[in-house]
Amino acid sequence: MVLGVMLVLASCIALGGVLVSRRDVEVRRDRDRQAQHALAGTLQAEARKLEVLYEAHLLSTGELLTQIWHDPESARQLAQNIEGIQHVAWLYWKSANPEMQLNLGFPANPPLPEPTLEKEHRGIPRPRVLLEAKLLFRDVGGKSSGWIDEPGKPLMFYVQVLGTTVVMVIDRHEVEAAMTGHFKTWLTEGFQSVAKLGGPDAVQDAQGKTLCAAGSLPDRQPDILGPVISRFGVWQIVSWDERQMNATYHVPTLAGSLALAVLVAGLGIGLSAQQRRTAKLAAQRVSFVNRVSHELRTPMTNILLNLDVIEESMPDSAASRFGLVREEAGRLSRLIENVLTFSRQEEGCLKLNHGPCLPTEVVSSIVRQFEPALLRRGITLKQTHEGEKTEAVLDADALAQITANLLSNVEKYAPGAAAAVHTRQSKNEFTLTVSDEGPGIPVSEAGRIFQAFYRVDDRVQAGVSGTGLGLSIARDLAQRMGGTLKLIPSEKGASFEFRLPLEVLQNHAGPPDSTLTTA
Amino acid sequence: MTILLADDDPVTLESLAACLQPEGFHTLLARDGEEALALWQKHKPDLLCLDIMMPGMDGYEVCRRVRATDAGVPILFLSAKSEEIDVVVGLRLGADDFVRKPFGKHELIARIGSALRRTQVVKSPAGSFQLGPLRVFPAELRAQREDMSTDLTPREVAILKLLHERSGQVLSRDTLLDVCWGLEYMPESRTLDQHIAKLRKKIERESEEIIETVRGVGYRWRGQG
């Protein structure tokens, strides 16, 4: 029991220590940065190449558009040959009618902003972007071109030839989409082999949409970003470092808890061994007492039988001494009986042997045994019976022992007083009451008198002998028989009542209410 | 009344015999199981008192073998190791009672009487006779008076039987000794007086005289009325 509890406790301590000392640490293995940068550089160069190509197309288209301003349909066809042109505006140097607009996109709501020279301020509620004339016409005698890429304005490309400027509003997203499409094709062949060599995990656009990837990608933010930037959009080369969760333990905590667990377990084993040793020793003692008591029984029987044999030939002068010897032999027998009963209780092997007997006869025989001793101590004993005298099934030896232990108390503690043994038998109950008019039992002691080895203090001091087992054994036997033994209230002295439910065997008794008196 | 006593302790055996013989029981003594069985086969005693722990054949085995041929004879077990007695086994083997050591003469005789009664009750109650207020049952070793049943020894039964048979006659001490103790037995003269005294204590009530002392001669029962 102790061992089990201690081992469970030790396990809990050890487990708690492991849990408390454990730390989960993330180990990160960096990817090859150079491979990332190499691909990013190549992609950037490709983007730049596309940009230059696109700009060249815009320039040549813009130059043509300056010449065919009067033919909107041809201009439309020309502008639509190039991706991304949404709107075309013609602006003229110092002209009274400086602008002409050509919207190439789908009808838009709100409508596309119209590039308009700064000097014009007509207050017409149309979306407009004002352009600086100085910039557009800085070289009115020759040619000029360039990007207008300013915050708050759409992306525009202008071409000026001899005082006529064509401004093209470019849809960045369309160009970006075209470039993305180009990159996809461009990456199709090379990316997987680059990825295998430790290259990046994926290429994504500005919205995080994957262009191409080597396998599935983690949900978390990428660890390496290689941006590819152009006027039209941003792409990025992304990679994730390899991460691994490793458990580590705080050694002092772990060692401390394990040491404590070992200590507790050791303590448990030690205590358990000690307990077993103690129990074994106690069992050996009980067993020894039991054996000795057994060995005492045979010589005791021989003594009792021989005392009975010589009783008749005993001269009168020695009769009282002989009586004394017999009483003491009887007392010794009862003592042996009580010690044996107690040791059997302790060993847990006390068994009752039920059989048919006359309970009143059992009580009477014990009363007869006690008569000489009671007489000598000046105790007047009155035995009365009420009810039937029939055979019943019970342990006669146990009943005899209960009666003897109760009478032994009367003999010890009520010298010179009157005492009474009253039996009552009905169809289903047998009651034995042993009462005396001696000093009685103090109320404060009443609860403890049935405890083994307990003796009322002043009686010990008064020199009354005894083991302190009698009442404890009597009560235990009473309970094992299925009955009760109680100290019942009485006006004077002590009064014990033993009640036993009966199983009646047969009925061959005389009339009730007969009284037998002995002194 | 013959009783077979079996015990491996010679002192106990001798003491048992010394207790029972003066009370009118005829005893057969056996030191072990084999001897007990042989004596039982030879003499067919009225009752057996067997110690359980005996060298060789133990009490249980003797009981089992006796019961195999005789279901009726009362068998008592005497043992110092009562808690080791398997009562269930004992009862199944057909034992009638277990007497736990230590015990005295009176307890033993009471248990013998009780065992005899239990087996005799089934048999015929004939043979009983009335002696004043007493009804004496010789086979059961008891006398019944109203509701009171008194245990008697074979010797006491013999005395009461003689008093009953010769009611009204004064029985001399010699006659009583010759008939109840037997001619070969030479008891001390006070033995008879002691027996009568004990018998009176058992059967007579205060200021009552069933057995009348005839000074200088002997004893008498006056007979009915």
Image: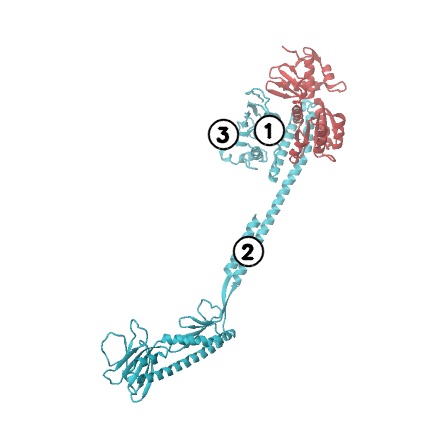
Chain colours: A cyan, B red
In the image: residue A432, left or right of residue B183: left
Question: Hey, which quadrant is residue A63 in on the image?
Answer: bottom left
Q: Are marks 2 and 1 on the same chain?
A: yes
Q: Residues within 10 Å of mark 1 (few under 14, many from 20)?
A: some
Q: Looking at the rendered structure, which numbered label has been put on residue A360? A: none
Identify which amino acid the numbered label 2 is placed on.
Answer: Ala
Read off the residue under disc 2: A261
Residue A253, horizontal then vertical, whole percent: 52, 61
Tell me whether marks 3 and 1 sit on the same chain.
yes
Mark number displayed over residue A489: 3
Report helix, strand or loop for mark 3.
loop
Q: CA distance from mark 3 to mark 1?
A: 29 Å
Badge 3: residue crowd in 10 Å (few <14, some 14–19, many ≥20): few
| First in residue order: circle 2 vs circle 3 | 2
- Residue A236 in sight: yes
The numbered mark at residue A393 is 1
**B225 left or right, relative to A492:** right
Above or below B153: residue A155: below
Q: Is residue A481 left or right of residue A43?
A: right
Say what amino acid the circle numbered 1 marks: Val
Residue A237 lies, with reference to residue A465, above or below; the image says: below
Counting residues from the start of the chain, the first of labels 2 and 1 encountered is 2
